[in-house]
Image (cartoon, rainbow, N blue to C red):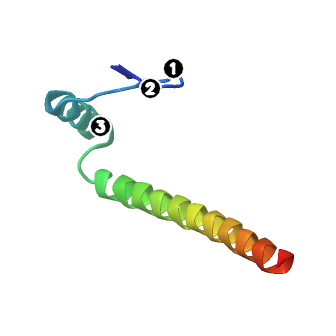
């Protein structure tokens, strides 16, 4: 485990740990459910990134508008 600057713990997973996690997931959900789970995970990550990019662009646009109105 690695501790970050703020004191939160970041898990450093080795290849062996990843294999064990994958096998546990495989046993819990079965081979047919895993593609569905991965699609849902991918969709969630995509939506999160889209929302993050929208907020970032709104902030940047707001900063640009403020700088142009002050001059």
Mark 3 and mark 1 lie on one chain; the one further toward the N terminus is: 1
- For the point 14% across and 28% down, which residue is it? 16
Mark 1 closeness class: few <14, some 14–19, many ≥20 residues within 10 Å: few
**In this figure, which residue is indicated by the disc labeled 3?**
25
Q: Position of residue 7 (x, y in %)?
A: 51, 20
Q: Residue furthest front?
A: 71
- Seen in the picture, residue 8 relative to 61 is either above or below; the reply is above
Q: Secondary structure at mark 3?
A: helix
- Is the residue under label 2 in contact with that under label 3 (CB below 8 Å)? no
When asked about the image quadrant of residue 14, the answer is: top left
Q: State the residue at coordinates (35%, 55%).
A: 38
| Badge 3 or badge 2: first in the primary sequence | 2
Secondary structure under tag 2 reads: loop
Question: In which quadrant will I find the N terminus?
Answer: top left
Does 69 appear above or below 7?
Answer: below
> What's the distance in space between the residues labelled 3 and 2, CA to CA?
28 Å
Towards the viewer: 58 or 13: 58
Give the spatial CA distance, label 3 vs label 1: 29 Å
Q: In the figure, residue 59 lies in which quadrant?
A: bottom right
Instruction: Specify few, some or many for label 2: CA neighbours under 10 Å numbering under 14, 14-19, or 20 or more.
Output: few
- Marks 1 and 2 in Cβ contact (< 8 Å): yes
Residue named by callout 2: 4
Question: What is the quadrant of the C terminus in the image?
Answer: bottom right
């Amino acid at each position: 485990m690695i501790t970050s600057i703020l004191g939160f713990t970041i898990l450093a997973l080795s290849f062996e740990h990843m294999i064990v996690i994958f096998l546990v997931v495989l046993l819990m959900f079965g081979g047919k459910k895993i593609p569905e789970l991965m699609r849902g995970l991918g969709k969630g990550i995509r939506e999160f990134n889209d929302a993050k990019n929208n907020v970032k662009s709104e902030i940047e646009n707001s900063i640009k508008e403020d700088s142009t109105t002050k001059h």
